Each structure stands twice: as structure tokens, then as C-alpha cells.
Image (tube, helix red, strand yellow):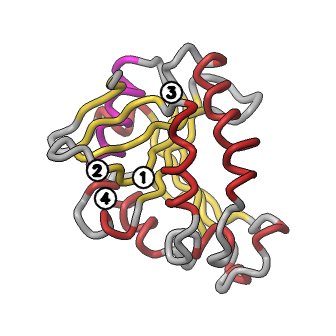
Amino acid sequence: MDTYLETERLALRHFTADDADLLIELDSDPAVMRYLSGGTPTAPEVVREHHLPKILVGYEKWGGDLGLFAAQEKDGGAFIGWFILRPEQEGPLDEVELGYRLRQAAWGKGYATEGSRALLRKAFTELGVRMVWAETMSVNQSSRNIMEKLEMTLVDTIPVPSDMEMIEGSEHGGVRYEITKEQWEQQ
């Protein structure tokens, strides 16, 4: 395994073309997809033909430094989900999104916070990032709690994309959190 980043309990790596089934399994759990699709699974062909190829192209585009990273437990190697650290499609490389999608079995263990903290450190100390942002639905209190643990600042409320309007709680919109390198250094 070519490790991108390690924490005390996690190893993050680049996805490979052989990882489609891991992504399909993750996206087939209604609880995991609750705030993304209302619980509707992502079709396997969409993962294989669209999502995974786009992930792999991202590594080429950003020199392997940014993108979507498979997360595995160091003890036993179980796939627990993924973390994201990447700019918007045509956005500046010094402003990147932080995110995560974890299997239910990994919830409540501190993995999202642990992996996110390590990615913030890498972004600000190795990758020349100036600002990291994250977005979620206003009602997704679990993700909001993690952003607050990371000492990210709530900077804006945002509309929910039209393809997410059917999700319970979408009428409350979304939220955007940010943290700058300067803010992170002062922690």
C-alpha cells in the first residue's frame, strides 16, 4: 500500500482502479447517504464509470497531493471510508475542501476528527494551502461537531443544491466552515 498519510490509528492512501467495490459498499448504506442523497444508494455503474475514474484523474491533475483518499485502520487494515482534501474543479490550489465519508462501523470512534486533523496539518505545513473549507447540511450535527472540534469557523449559510432538496432537513439549507493557515497556527 502506498501510504499518503498516517495517523495514530489510520492509514490514508490513493484509491486504485480495483477499489470500486469499496466505494459501492460505502455508498449503498442508507445511513451513510442520509445527508447526501436522502439514503438512496449510488448506482454501482455510476461509481465504476464516473466517480472512480474522476478520483483517479484527480491524482494526475494535482500531482497526487490532493484528492480523495481511502482510509483504512492500521490495526487489521479494514476499509473505513474516505477523506477528501482538494480544491474546487477550477479553484485555486491554496483553497481546498476537507471532507469525509465513513462506514457506520467507524462512526463514533473519533476517526473523522483524527483523519481531518492530520489532513489540516499536511495542508498547512506541506502543501502550501492558505485556507481549508468544509460544507454540510445545517441539520447534520455530527459533521458540524467535527468541524467545530477542528476549530473551523462557521462563515456562511448556503443553499442546498437542487438535487438535494428532497432530503429531510434540506429546508434549513447548508453551512460552510473555514479555517485559515493563520488560525490553525494559533491553536
Label 4 close to label 1 by CB (< 8 Å): no
Gap in angstroms between the C-alphas marked 2 and 4: 25 Å
Observer-nearest residue: 30 or 176?
30
Q: Which residue is mark 1?
A: 81
Name the residue furthest right: 162
Element type at mark 4: helix
User: So how many labels did they put on this image?
Assistant: 4
Which label sits on residue 149?
4
Which label sits on residue 130?
3
| Tag nearer the camera, 3 or 1 | 1
Q: Earlier in the sequence, mark 4 or mark 3?
A: 3
Q: Say what amino acid the circle numbered 4 marks.
A: Lys
Q: Earlier in the sequence, mark 2 or mark 4?
A: 2
Q: Which residue is mark 2?
A: 78
Q: Is residue 125 magenta?
A: yes
Q: Residue at x 57, y 24 (%)?
A: 94
Gap in angstroms between the C-alphas marked 3 and 1: 26 Å
Q: Say what amino acid the circle numbered 3 marks.
A: Arg
Label 3 close to label 1 by CB (< 8 Å): no
- Report the side of 44 relative to 161 (left or right): left
Gap in angstroms between the C-alphas marked 3 and 2: 33 Å
Q: Quadrant of the N terminus?
A: top left
Q: Residue at x 37, y 17 (%)?
A: 126
Label 4 close to label 3 by CB (< 8 Å): no
Q: How many residues crowd mark 3 within 10 Å: few (<14), some (14–19), many (20+)?
A: some
Specify the segment rendered in magenta: 114-126
Q: Say what amino acid the circle numbered 1 marks.
A: Gly
